[in-house]
Image: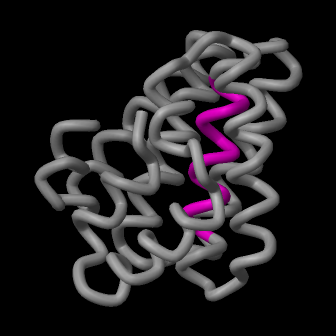
Amino acid sequence: MYTLNSLGNYRLGIKYTNEGRGIAKEMEDKGAEGHVYRILGVSYVGLGDYHRAIEFAEQGMRITKEMADTGAEGHVYRILAGSYVGLGDYQRRIEYAKKGIRIAKQVGDTHVQYCRTDTDRYLQLTVRKFRTDRHSWLRTVICG
């Protein structure tokens, strides 16, 4: 599913991810279900359907908080940040990006910390990139 997203084939990724969601629910695997919601969030950001991306990210957030999965919570904040920049709500984007950075530092995720060192400068770069190429922008925003 990540491979399909990275190739820009978001609709096919969504199809297979939804199949995985059914399996995760059937097996009552909350960790897998939360992961599926995060993948769906990323996919909908890629399609430019930011409201749906937020819906799935929020569903994923409920599960990650329930499971106390801090690293996954940081990923959800990155999805939300990407969704809000797509909607033009840069203030919320900064809010979620900062939460994601805080969690990255907390869990020792140096890759994300490196990507988000200067949030305001990063925001300007991602907005510029979004305007020219949403697909490669998605890889930059979700970064990690």
| Residue 132 screen position, x and y as percent | 25, 86
Q: Is residue 48 magenta?
A: no
122 in relation to 41, above or below: below
32 in relation to 90, above or below: above
**Quadrant of the snapshot with the C terminus:** top left
| Residue lying furthest left | 7
Q: Is residue 73 magenta?
A: yes
> Which stretch appears magenta?
72-83
Residue drawn at (35%, 89%), measured in percent from left and top?
131
Place residue 99 in its image quadrant.
top right
Place residue 119 in its image quadrant.
bottom right
118 in relation to 50, above or below: above
Residue 136 horizontal side relative to residue 19, left or right: left
| Residue 61 screen position, x and y as percent | 76, 38
The secondary structure that dominates the magenta segment is helix
- Residue 28 seen by the camera: no
Residue drawn at (55%, 45%), measured in percent from left and top?
116
| Residue 34 screen position, x and y as percent | 63, 28
- Residue 77 seen by the camera: yes
Q: Nearer the viewer, residue 62 or 119?
A: 119
Residue drawn at (55%, 63%), measured in percent from left and top?
82
Residue drawn at (44%, 70%), measured in percent from left and top?
126
| Residue 63 screen position, x and y as percent | 78, 28
